[in-house]
Amino acid sequence: MLAAVTAATAFPIAKPGCQDRCGNVSIPYPFGTRKDCYYGPEFLITCNHSFNPPKAFIGKGTLEVTEITPDVKLRLMQYIAEDCYNRTGARTKRNIPWINLPTQGPYVFSDTDNMFVAIGCDTHAELQGIREDTYDTYLVGCISECSSKTVVPNTCSGVGCCHTSIAKGTNYFDVHLSSKTNHTGIWEFNPCSFAFMIEEKQFSFFPSNLSDLENVTKLPIIVDWSIGRNNCETLEKNKMSNACQGQSKCHDPENGSGYICKCLGGYQGNPYLPNGCQSMHFFFLILSLFFIIFYLHKEKVKLFVIDFEEISNLIFRNWIT
């Protein structure tokens, strides 16, 4: 019976006949893995089956997607910056990561979900970003210095770890690290500096990070996405069509340009699909029916025979029409 409830109330996420999964990643429309399955080529997801399980990538590039969330966000994995030295202060390793999101998206790094973090006791970190709406370059950063591991707390508060926010509308960034004394004097417990953008809720700092991040190559970041370059007011003023389907409405994104679609109040699902926004009243009706039948079955009340799956399918068909 539970399977019937799930089948009857499941919200569609992809166009009919289109792949809605790549490995562990769900692929909701407007994204798709081939033509006629995505809204535009900027929403192409390449499913690479040479991995086990398969991995999803934006377009035909190398940016790996680990999740596409219902609230117009992508979770990606990005390299961290490292700057390492030996006991005498000679550099042994250096990594300067950068990431450039597809400009036709538009995709921008989430200013509310991400933060810029630097870890180390002889660490000067900088993030250089470019904003997609103005193409201006900006620079943020922080400094973390300490002489002993014993003074480093379990919080990222400026001693051994520092952090700062990023600007709205950023679609490119690179990270640079430098050191005052090449970690001499603190090499025993902190031979490296690290810096990275990271999804804020995925980050917790511990003094052990001063050394154990050498074994980490990538960390999660969040990207906001929207459709086109025109906002809702421009679309309405010029009588231009948009991607929002029945029982949904156009909204301006909080970050970046273009617009997004949201289901109306009382509805839930994918606002970019026809009939994608489904009434929550229907969901609760089916759920209530399930619990009533479950109770009757449990109490062995056999007043009549009910074909639950047939009833739920009938209600669903009537609701659609």
Image: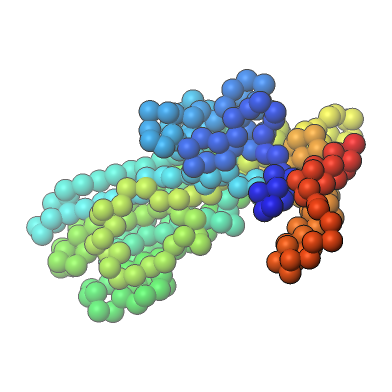
User: How far across and how far down the image is residue 27, in percent?
Assistant: 59, 37
Q: Residue at x 60, y 47 (%)?
A: 69
Looking at the figure, which quarter contains the C terminus? top right
User: How far across and how far down the image is residue 81, in percent?
Assistant: 33, 49
User: How far across and how far down the image is residue 117, in percent?
Assistant: 42, 59
With respect to residue 161, does 60 lie above or below?
above
Q: Is residue 15 left or right of residue 75?
A: right
User: Quarter-wise, where is residue 135 in the image?
Assistant: top right
Q: Residue at x 25, y 54 (%)?
A: 214
Q: Is residue 286 left or right of residue 189?
A: right
Q: Is residue 59 left or right of residue 80?
A: right
Residue 11 seen: yes
With respect to residue 51, does 77 lie above or below?
below
Q: Residue at x 75, y 46 (%)?
A: 309
- Along the line of sight, the residue nearer the viewer: 49 or 313: 313
- Along the line of sight, the residue nearer the viewer: 283 or 214: 283
